[in-house]
Image: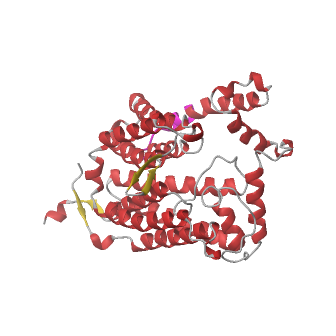
Amino acid sequence: MTDIRRDARSFDFLLAIMVIALGVFGVIMVGSTTGLGRGNVSSVFINQLVFFITGIGIMVLAAFVNYEFIAKFHWPIFGVNLLLLVWVLVAPAPGNVSRWLGWEIGGFELGIQPSEFAKIFMLIFLAKIIDRHREKINNPLIVAMVVGLTLVPVGLIFIQPSLSAPLVPLFIMAALLYTGKISYKYIIALLIIAVPVALYLFVDLHRAPGERVILDMVSAYQLGRVWYFLYPELDVGVVYTYQNLAAMRALNSGMLTGRGLFGNTIAVPEPTNDFIFAIIGAEFGFIGSILVILAALIIIIRILQIANRSDVFLGRLIATGVAAAIAFQVFTHVAINAWLLPNTGMGFPFVSSGGSAMWVFMAMVGLSINVGMTRAKSMFDEM
């Protein structure tokens, strides 16, 4: 363990305030999409408010519990991660979709989404593994170990089934390996493999339905989302593109300044989660949408600054992974809402509804603040 010291005076209040402000805005938007403007106080709104308030406590706790102490338990954390992901697969699930674990406590239903917790669990685990093997990061066995250990939970999430959730741990892994200064030969090797595979899958997508190899990996409905994203004019019944079209109508209806809070009149599917950015566009227009993106960008840049300033390598890895996870989800969510990517379902951090996601991203920010308050001791600190 690195010998580090903590300076509470370095608590990043700007980062905390920006995250809380975005979270408050998210609670208001969830209320807007569930009829708060008409006096309807929905359970979704109440849940979001509760998870946001408790999330602030989690952020503060994560900021003050030494992240190196937490990382010491990286293998137990990895084990709990796998246990939850396996548990959710064997637990009874409606509609053949295994994504949530739920309990009833005193009449209150508590549900968690293990795929969300996998993001922070894998962040801590991979950061510690890469930190421990920093000097040998370009050893093929070390790279294979990192990739292999990442693919296990990613595979468990994929078979829930989920197309979007597995991408976040993979992106975190890529960001951490890059921060660990992995050799470019591995990146080139990945491209040499990935490009032909992508071309093959694109050709396979255009084969007759009974001949598509890709159907052995994804469902026909998931494949349909990709197909009709590429060729929306072929979706005559507007089955696969309905959500995207509704989101685009909502975004366009806001024009420059929007229709005002609670002013959206366009019915959008999954408005509290996957397509909440479309509601933001409808109610606050282009200007409001840009301001929300800028707020997220400030948070990402602030965390990257913490990573850059950290002289503890483990801390640099953790902060970089947090920034990567937030950036990936913000970009993907906005791109899906703007119909620049196929609809795979991806929430906007701190804004979209979802208690597990709120807790996880609040904890991630807390860890980043934690990194900013610690630095390696030098010989001058002992004098």
251 left or right of 1? right
How are the colours assigned in the image? secondary structure
Q: Is residue 322 visible?
A: yes
Q: Quadrant of residue 261?
A: bottom right
Q: Is residue 308 visible?
A: no
Which stretch did the figure color magenta? 178-189
Kindly identify the residue that appears in the image at 42 percent across and 35 percent down. Answer: 146
Kindly identify the residue that appears in the image at 37 percent across and 59 percent down. Answer: 367
Front-lying residue, 309 or 17: 17
Query: In the image as oriented, which residue stretches furthest toward the left?
Result: 383
Q: Quadrant of residue 97?
A: top right
Kindly identify the residue that appears in the image at 56 percent across and 61 percent down. Answer: 352
Front-lying residue, 30 or 214: 30
Q: Quadrant of residue 32?
A: bottom right
Magenta stretch: residue 120 in it?
no
235 left or right of 336? right
Residue 173, x across and y down, in percent:
47, 43
